Amino acid sequence: MSAIPVEEDAPVKSNRSILIGVVLALAAGLFVYALPTPEGLSPVGHRYLALLVTIIILWISEALPIGVTGLLAGASLILFQIQPAAKAWEPFANPAVMFVLMIMMFGIILDEAGVAKRILHLIVKAAGTNVKKLSLVLAISSAYLSAFFHDATITIILLFSFLPVFAAMGITPSRSNNLSKFFVILIPLSASAGGFGSLLGGGRNPVMVAKLQAMTGYEMGFLEFAMLNLPLVLVPALVTWAICYLVFRPEIKHLPASVTAEALPPMNIKQKGVVFFFALAFVLWAITDITKVHYSVVAAGALALIFGFRLVSFDVVFKKFPWESWLVFGSGVAMGLAMLDSGAGKWVAGQFIPLLEGQNWMVVFAGAGFFGSFISSFMSNAAATALVLPITIPMAQSMGIPEAAIAMSAPISTSFIMLVIGCPPTIIAYSTGYFSQMDFIKVAVPWAITCVIMVTLSAAIYWPLIGFHGLPLLGIK
């Protein structure tokens, strides 16, 4: 089985549905553009918001292939003079985008070498074939592993290990059902949800620590960050499992016994080589703070070794690579940077965040969290964190609220995205073809909202109990 299932038998959209989607997107964009430019928003920012509405509707409706919409997004930034040409296309080669490209290749490699099947065998042997129990173990494991390793890496390992199960059951992307949608959405959302657990979990975490120190002089160390956040990771892990299960409740209660009954032969030399180089990359990713070697360099080196020793054919990986999904992620980064450069992001934040003034710390934390979750659906979570903190930290200072507590809302909430383009794990999962954008939104929107609420409540109980900056329990003085 190929790691990225082909979609040649996917249902074809009718010309009418395509036309309706395109017309609706254009009409919405023109409506936003026709509105008077609000005070404090530049004309460039106004044009950007009109384009953003158009692109989002095209992505959600899938009126056009999402890769085509992604290319149109980059071209439109130039056409409407929102970004110069070089700056509009440069994000497609952004280090994070290139890392996602290489991580997707790892997924194909794991499958082609037969390693994915072995990982699945170990997972099911440990957790059993009961869908409810197995999925709960996966959700918690994925969240906590992503607190220390890149969420895209964890997604690749767990997600592509499960694809052979669907193939064995005759479940293809065009015949996707609740079981496949449940697992394929559960794994990346769990991985994204756990990324705030430690400073190793993602770029948003060190960005928050650096911003906090620069603006207040308060230096939060690795152990303090982990002590505050690691216990909270369990909350979004359970919420993720519950929301996914409620929306896509699988009718199948047990996976086929054959997934564990089959005796696997010893690993051959190519499988051992793939495992060794992947494990080496895993270790090097974990110590990038010490080595100062960028994670994309590590990924490129591991791929060079795998292809150089001919453990897997580069031609096969190239042919099976989901280029469309990668283009979407690149365009998402381009749109996110344009939001910052045009001033649209700062203007949107300026309209929302001040509404929280005068509230207790728990309400401010949750409100900032909702905004962080929303804004990170259109840009990288590190960029969203950098956008929000210059507004929330001074507001906390003026209200007499501990800045560190409110600052922590940014890396936590930006873990909970509402659109597929929001983070690498969801783009990787979408590339398999097992769910649509609307399938994802049905889960992601209630998931993000619920996660923000539940983590806020948990922090409002846990942090005061451990004496974090003298915070009052549940924000009540």
Image (spheres, rainbow, N blue to C red):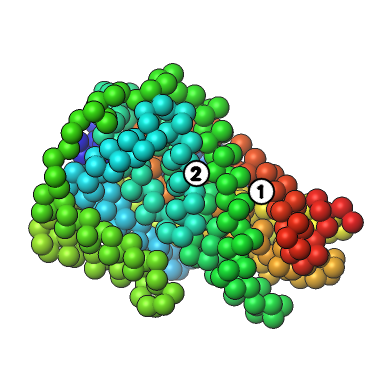
CA gap between label 2 and label 1 equals 15 Å
Amino acid at dot 2:
Ile
- 381 vs 282, nearest the viewer: 282
Residue 141 point in image, percent of width and height: 45, 46
Secondary structure type for disc 2: helix
As drawn, the label of residue 404 is none
* Residue in view at x 75 percent, y 51 percent: 461
Tell me residue 96's x, y (percent).
40, 63
Dot 1, crowdedness within 10 Å: few (<14), some or many (≥20)?
many
Q: Nearer the viewer, mark 2 or mark 1?
A: 2
Q: Is residue 95 above or below residue 361?
A: below
Residue type (three-letter) at the residue carrying disc 1: Val
Task: Give the residue drawn at x 87%, y 58%.
Answer: 358
Quadrant of the image containing the C terminus = bottom right
Q: Pointer 2: what residue?
A: 140
Residue under label 1, please give it: 455
Can you say whether 419 is above or below 222 in the image?
above
* Extreme residue in the top direction: 251
Q: What secondary structure is marked by label 1?
A: helix
In front: 161, or 434? 161
Q: The N terminus lies in which quarter of the figure?
A: top left
Q: Residue at x 34, y 25 (%)?
A: 255
N-terminal of the two: label 2 or label 1?
2
Residue 191: x %, y % from top left: 47, 49
